[in-house]
Image (tube, coloured by chain):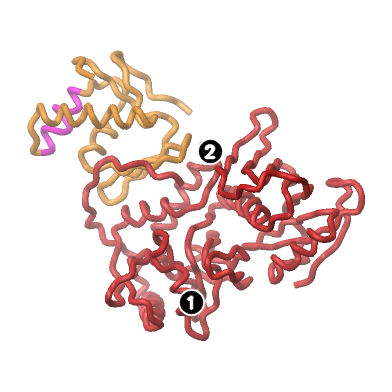
C-alpha cells in the first residue's frame, strides 16, 4: 500500500493533498490543504492507505468548531437536493451520494475524523447490503469470528486473550459486507478500548458470538428471533431514512439466516479461543446452518434504537 | 378505546419479518424495533383497516388461544394503543385503507 498524492481541483482551491483511505474495500479520498492534518491522516490510517481509485471524496476544511464528541449525532437528508447532512457538536458535513463528494468542517480532532468516516461508511454499506456492528472481530484459520454484547461483556477481553495466530480486525466496530458464501468481515482502523488499529485484511464470517462472562466456557444456540433482536441492538446506523432503514433491516434478517449466531459464555482465559476455533472447524465439517426454533414469546418490547 | 367499532391498519412506514413464530417489526421512520408475541402477531396480521378490532379479537384471538374474551379485548386495546403511539398501527373509528407507499 502506498500513499497517493494528487490534486483535486474540483473539490478545493489551493493545493490540497489527498490521502486515499480504503476500508472494507471502499476507497475514499480525504483531501486537505493543511499539511499537519494530512500527517495526522497518514499516521492514523497507516495500513489502510491505498493507491486505488477513490469511489468517494471528502474535502476537509479545518475550523474552530464545538468540541463535544459526545453530543448527539444527526444524520439527515437535505430535502432540497438529497445531500446527506452529518452533524455533531464537533463537526458538520455535507455529502452528495450521487457524485460521491462531500465537504467536512471540523477541527483537527482525530476522533471527529473517525466519526465522519464511520457515518459515511455506514451509509454506503446500508445501500450495498452490509453493515457496521458494535463488535470485536478477529480472523483465525482463514475464518472471521465476531464478538458482540453489552458494554463490559468482554469484547476487548476476547481480543486481549487472543493467542498467536489470531489476527485482530477490530476491537470495536466490525465491518461486514455480503460475500459469496455469507458475509465477509474486514479490518478497520477504528480502535476501541484496546487503542490498537485492526489489520487491513478480511475473511468470511464463521460465526457471531454474543458474549457473556461466566464460570466456564460454553457455546449455546440462540433462537433466530433472539439473534435478530440482539443483532439489531448492536448495529451502528445513524441516519433517519426510511429507505435505508428498511434495507438495513432486510440485511440483518439475511445475516441471521446465513451466519451462525451463538451465545458464548466464557471464563476470561485463553482457553476460550480453543472453543471458538473448534466451533469453526466443526461447523465447517457439519455445514449445519440451522437454528433452534424454540422461541419464548415476548410482549411488544421497549423499542430499541438502531 | 372503548368504542365498539375500532379499526386498525398497519402503517406503511414499517418493515416486518416473521421469524419462528414471532413478528419482528421495525418503524423505518425512527428506527424503533419491536418484537411481537404470537397473540400480538395475530392482531398485527389481521389489521387490514376494515375488520373491527372486536371482531379480530373474537375470531382470531379467542378462537385460536385459550383466553377470556373480556381480558383478550382489554389486552388487545392496550396493545393497539401502544403500537399506534409508535406509529406502527393506525387507529380509527371508521374503516381505514391500508397505507400505500
**Looking at this view, is A147 or B8 the one in front?**
A147
Task: Please report the residue visible at 75 percent of the width from the left and 72 percent of the height from the top.
Answer: A1
Q: What stretch is highlighted in magenta?
A: B54-65
- Give how far across and how far down residue A122 sits, in percent: 58, 51
* Residue indicated by mark 1: A160
Q: Is mark 2 on a helix, strand or loop?
A: loop
Estimate the spatial distance between the alpha carbons at disc 1 and disc 2, rounded to whole Å.
35 Å
Task: Please report the residue visible at 55 percent of the width from the left and 59 percent of the height from the top.
Answer: A177
Q: Of tags 1 and 2, which is closer to the observer?
A: 1
Chain B representation colour: orange
**Looking at this view, is A285 or B36 the one in front?**
B36
The quarter of the displayed image where residue A28 is located: bottom right
**Looking at this view, is A293 or A138 the one in front?**
A138
From the viewer's perspective, tell me whether residue A158 is left or right of residue A301: right
Chain A representation colour: red
Residue B38 on the magenta segment: no
> Quick one: quadrant of the N terminus of chain B?
top left
Query: How many labels, in total?
Result: 2
From the viewer's perspective, tell me whether residue A189 is left or right of residue B2: right
On what subunit does the disc labeled 2 rest? A
Q: Which residue lies furthest to the right in this view?
A: A14
* Residue indicated by mark 2: A240
- Give how far across and how far down residue A4 sits, in percent: 82, 65
Give the answer, above or below, for where B79 lies relative to A234: above
Q: Is mark 1 on a helix, strand or loop?
A: helix
- Give how far across and how far down residue A272 sits, in percent: 37, 79
- Give how far across and how far down residue A291 sits, in percent: 30, 62
The quarter of the displayed image where residue A230 is located: bottom left
Q: How crowded is mark 1: few (under 14 residues within 10 Å), some or many (20 or more)?
A: some
Magenta span: predominant SS is: helix
Task: Please report the residue visible at 38 percent of the width from the left and 24 percent of the height from the top.
Answer: B98
Q: Which mark is residue A261?
A: none
Amino acid at each position: 500500500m502506498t500513499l497517493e498524492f494528487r490534486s483535486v481541483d474540483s473539490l478545493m482551491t489551493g493545493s490540497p493533498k489527498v490521502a486515499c483511505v480504503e476500508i472494507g474495500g471502499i476507497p475514499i479520498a480525504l483531501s486537505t490543504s493543511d499539511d499537519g492534518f494530512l500527517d495526522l491522516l497518514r499516521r492514523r490510517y497507516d495500513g489502510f492507505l491505498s493507491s486505488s481509485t477513490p469511489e468517494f471524496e471528502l474535502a476537509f476544511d479545518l475550523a474552530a468548531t464545538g468540541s463535544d464528541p459526545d453530543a448527539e449525532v444527526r444524520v439527515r437528508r437535505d430535502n432540497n437536493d438529497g445531500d446527506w447532512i452529518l452533524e455533531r457538536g464537533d463537526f458538520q458535513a455535507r455529502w452528495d451520494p450521487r457524485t460521491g463528494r462531500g465537504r467536512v468542517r471540523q477541527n483537527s480532532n482525530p476522533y471527529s475524523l473517525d466519526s465522519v468516516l464511520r457515518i459515511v461508511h455506514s451509509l454506503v454499506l446500508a445501500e450495498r447490503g452490509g453493515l457496521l456492528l458494535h463488535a470485536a472481530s478477529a480472523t483465525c484459520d482463514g475464518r472471521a469470528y465476531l464478538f458482540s454484547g453489552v458494554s463490559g461483556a468482554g469484547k476487548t477481553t476476547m481480543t486481549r486473550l487472543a493467542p498467536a495466530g489470531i489476527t485482530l480486525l477490530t476491537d470495536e466496530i466490525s465491518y461486514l459486507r455480503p460475500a459469496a458464501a455469507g458475509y465477509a468481515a474486514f479490518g478497520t482502523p477504528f480502535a476501541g478500548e484496546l487503542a490498537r488499529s485492526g489489520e487491513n485484511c478480511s475473511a468470511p464470517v464463521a460465526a457471531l458470538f454474543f458474549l457473556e462472562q461466566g464460570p466456564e466456557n460454553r457455546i449455546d444456540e440462540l433462537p433466530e428471533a433472539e439473534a435478530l433482536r440482539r443483532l439489531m441492538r448492536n448495529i451502528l446506523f445513524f441516519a433517519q431514512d426510511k429507505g435505508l432503514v428498511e434495507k438495513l433491516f432486510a440485511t440483518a434478517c439475511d445475516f441471521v439466516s446465513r451466519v451462525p449466531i451463538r451465545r458464548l459464555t466464557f471464563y476470561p482465559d485463553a482457553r476460550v479461543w480453543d472453543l471458538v476455533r473448534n466451533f469453526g472447524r466443526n461447523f465447517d465439517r457439519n455445514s449445519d446452518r440451522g437454528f433452534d426454533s424454540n422461541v419464548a414469546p415476548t410482549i411488544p418490547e421497549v423499542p430499541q434504537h438502531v | 378505546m372503548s368504542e365498539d367499532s375500532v379499526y386498525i391498519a398497519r402503517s406503511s412506514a414499517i418493515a416486518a419479518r416473521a421469524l419462528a413464530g414471532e413478528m419482528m417489526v421495525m418503524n423505518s421512520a425512527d428506527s424503533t424495533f419491536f418484537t411481537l408475541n404470537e397473540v400480538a402477531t395475530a392482531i398485527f396480521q389481521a389489521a387490514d383497516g376494515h375488520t373491527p378490532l372486536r371482531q379480530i379479537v373474537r375470531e382470531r384471538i379467542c378462537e385460536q388461544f385459550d383466553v377470556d374474551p373480556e381480558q383478550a379485548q382489554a389486552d388487545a386495546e392496550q396493545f393497539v394503543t401502544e403500537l399506534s403511539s409508535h406509529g406502527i398501527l393506525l387507529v380509527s373509528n371508521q374503516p381505514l385503507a391500508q397505507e400505500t407507499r
